[in-house]
């Protein structure tokens, strides 16, 4: 009997030893994977056309990340359906660290706006880090006879539905900001969706649409050149890039506070070691003085948080925007 107990005890010890050995080999393998990766170019998917803030940030990050990793980072545009086509592509990509998404706040809004999405933004992605926050700004074509928000609202009330506002697509941040502006301002306007900031800004400059609530980056040169008139920023505090432009809260729409963040995500099953390696390299890039100056020049505020902090940000925004989407009655099949 004693011999059997000793045999069982030694068997259990052997199993523990084997398990410990396997775990050690697994950890060693994971560490080796993180150190050897990447061995080929990385694709950074932008879910909007070239020329917008997402594209500008992706190229700035991609250039520096390529230097840090020793492999090309190829920025690839896959626009459409309010940024959801590009997101779906990355969600279904091989989780090997070679396909990443330059995501944005738009994706947390789309979760509530679209009745059916082919992916779950919280479950099908591994957050890496938030790159930057960029305030949105209400800009109008200079031919519009309004010098401030009050005058713009007065114009909108005279002819309901005549004034138009463009967005980067149905269900994007600009769309929701416009809907919120209508609701809080007590006006009716016509929403005109585009595939991205490039074509949107072209039509705004040409007078085909009245206004937009785009991020500062694509419209900043035109504001400085006097080709567009900035009436207000949509965040709770003024932008350091446009310090003379009031907030919508200051302009009379009390409590208005909506902005746009942009960040890097990978497919959900990407090994944690690769996510940690990516986060480490990206945070170094984001905190570098040259990169921070580059961000300031385009109206962006650098962030560089942990994957866990970005995940909480996504969760909180998804819940916050669900209520705003419901109140604004924005829905897309």
Image: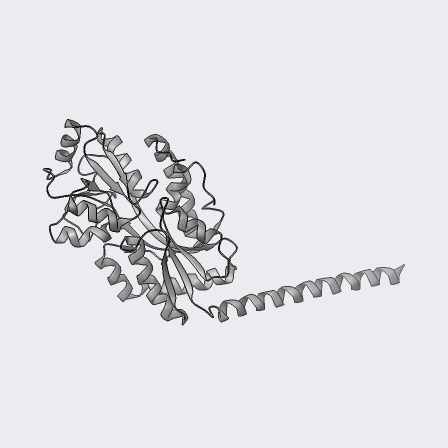
Instruction: From the top left corner, tell me how far across and down residue 60 is, in percent.
Output: 30, 62
Closest to the observer, 79 or 100: 79
Total numbered labels placed on residues in the image? 0
Residue 255 seen by the camera: no
Vertical order, 59 against 211 (above or below): below
Left or right of 133: which side holds 99?
right
Image coords of residue 35 (percent x, y): 49, 70
Point out the image quarter for the N terminus: bottom right
In the rendered structure, the answer to whether residue 296 lies left or right of residue 330 reads: left
At 37% from the left and 53% from the top, the residue drawn is 78
Coloring applied to the structure: one colour
The residue located at (48%, 62%) in the rendering is 274
Q: Residue furthest right?
A: 1
Residue 285, quarter of the rendered image: bottom left
Q: Name the foreground residue: 41 vs 7.
A: 41
Question: At 40% across and 51% down in the image, what residue appears?
Answer: 86
State the image quarter where residue 182 is shown.
top left
**Residue 205, percent across and down?**
16, 47
Image location of residue 283, percent across then percent down? 37, 62
Q: Quadrant of residue 8?
A: bottom right
- Of 292 and 96, nearer the camera is 96
**Quadrant occupied by the C terminus:** top left
> Residue 150: in sight, yes or no?
yes
């Amino acid at each position: 009997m004693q011999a059997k107990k000793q045999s069982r005890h030694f068997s259990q010890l052997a199993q523990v030893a084997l398990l410990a050995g396997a775990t050690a080999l697994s950890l060693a393998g994971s560490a080796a994977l993180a150190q050897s990766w990447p061995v080929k170019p990385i694709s950074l998917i932008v879910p909007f056309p070239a020329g917008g803030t997402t594209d500008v940030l992706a190229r700035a990050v991609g250039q520096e990340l390529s230097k840090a990793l020793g492999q090309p980072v190829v920025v690839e545009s896959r626009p459409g359906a309010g940024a959801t086509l590009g997101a779906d592509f990355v969600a279904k990509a091989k989780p090997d660290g070679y396909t990443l998404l330059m995501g944005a706040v738009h994706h947390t809004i789309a979760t509530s706006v679209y009745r059916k999405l082919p992916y779950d933004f919280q479950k099908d992605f591994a957050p890496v880090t938030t790159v930057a926050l960029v305030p949105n700004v209400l800009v109008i074509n200079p031919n519009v006879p309004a010098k401030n928000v009050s005058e713009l609202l007065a114009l909108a009330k005279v002819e309901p539905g005549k004034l138009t506002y463009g967005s980067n697509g149905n269900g994007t941040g600009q769309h929701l900001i416009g809907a919120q502006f209508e609701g809080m301002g007590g006006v009716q306007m016509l929403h005109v969706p585009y595939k991205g900031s490039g074509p949107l800004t072209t039509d705004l400059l040409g007078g085909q649409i009245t206004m937009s609530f785009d991020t500062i980056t694509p419209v900043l040169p035109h504001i400085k050149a006097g080709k567009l008139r900035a009436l207000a920023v949509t965040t709770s505090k003024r932008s350091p890039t446009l310090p003379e432009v009031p907030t919508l809260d200051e302009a009379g729409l009390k409590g208005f506070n909506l902005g746009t963040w942009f960040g890097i995500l990978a497919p959900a099953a990407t090994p944690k070691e690769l996510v940690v390696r990516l986060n480490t390299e990206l945070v170094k890039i984001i905190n570098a003085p040259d990169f921070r100056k580059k961000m300031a020049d385009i109206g962006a505020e650098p962030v560089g948080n942990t994957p866990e902090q970005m995940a909480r940000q996504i969760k909180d925004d998804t819940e916050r925007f669900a209520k705003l989407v419901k109140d604004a009655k924005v829905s897309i099949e």
